[in-house]
Amino acid sequence: MILIDGKKVAAEMKQEIAEEVKKIVENGGRAPHLAAILVGHDGGSETYVAYKIKDCEAVGFKSSLIRYEDDVTEEELLSKIDELNNDDELDGFIVQLPLPKHISEQKVIEAINPKKDVDGFHPANVGRMVIGLPSYISATPYGIVELLKRYNIETSGKNCVIVGRSNIVGRPLSVLMSQKAVNATVTVAHSRTKDLEEVCRNADILIAAIGVPEFVKGNMVKDGAVVIDVGTTRVKSDKTKSGWKLKGDVLFEDVADKCSYITPVPGGVGPMTRVSLLQNTLLSAKKEIYK
Ligand code: NAP
């Protein structure tokens, strides 16, 4: 079994991005600039945004953090988005989700100029991805495909089962995995799938994006399968300082011996998600998606 080291691959990618930034600046260009809008004080969102800002610093990007309290109105937020859409000094921005209930996330996503939508959530980018046009691909699916590529894992003609069909992971990943560059035969499973264990046992590549800790057990995995664990659920722990630890969707001890490759949690998909946002921002700065 080979443990897929997402942390190491993400560090290599960060290094590559930092070198590109250095060249851009040496040639008289400006450093790529990413902004993040954070509403409220949700612990998870605070952490994710802090990582994004730190990652920007690490590769030489400029970053801006725009904060609002929970009671910001939808109108105020949309007006800020309009301002950022028209800021020529900004390559891309993200609005950290979830948003308070009185704000429509879909309205917010659709207000972002697709050319600056480095999260790849705007319907224009999702649609472009589906028909194989250049687009910003959402960070987790992008990171997973890159991980498979960099480990030279054969995907062509393989049966890929993705458990989970969310708009940010399972659904876009299913499109990417079936595209000509990857050539897998894809099954998307979900909470209504019948005989899920049997469906999973048929997978050469099994990707779990469910959010149910340790859901995938050894009896659901074919010998020699590649297992990608997207799940990150915080569960209580008296062994950590924070009082919680991250659990994946795969019962690692039960599954690892059966696999050819497996991602750990943490240290597998998570770091790749982080670096993919940087990659999209760099693509925007270089005008490689929208010429
Ligand atoms: P989500 O929007 O809640 O979607 C979960 C999906 O799993 C749904 O399609 C749901 O089916 C399916 N599902 C739930 N329980 C199931 C069951 N018992 N059997 C079969 N399918 C089941 O979640 P998400 O946003 O995609 O995230 C999934 C997990 O990945 C979470 O743990 C999240 O924290 C993690 N995540 C990690 C990263 C990272 O960078 N590592 C990034 C994003 C997300 P239905 O559609 O039928 O309800």
Image (cartoon, rainbow, N blue to C red):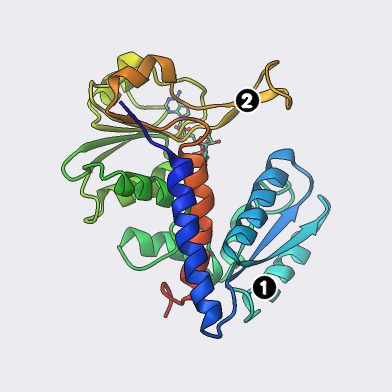
Disc 2 under 8 Å from ligand 1? The reply is no
Q: Seen from this angle, which residue lies furthest bottom?
A: 28
Q: Residue at x 39, y 49 (%)?
A: 172
- Judging by the rendered image, the residue that carries numbered circle 2 is 245
Depth order, front residue of 76/69: 69
Q: Where does the image place residue 289, in percent across and percent down from the top left?
A: 41, 72
User: Between 189 and 275, which is closer to the camera in this rendering?
Assistant: 275
Amino acid type of the residue tagged 2 in the rendering: Lys
Residue 121 visible within the image? no
The residue closer to the viewer here, 173 or 243, is 243
**Rendered view: 172 above or below 89:** above
What residue is disc 1 on?
84
Circle on res. 159? none
Disc 1 residue type? Answer: Leu
* Image quarter of the N terminus: top left
Label 1 near ligand 1 (CB < 8 Å): no
Q: CA distance from mark 2 to mark 1?
A: 36 Å
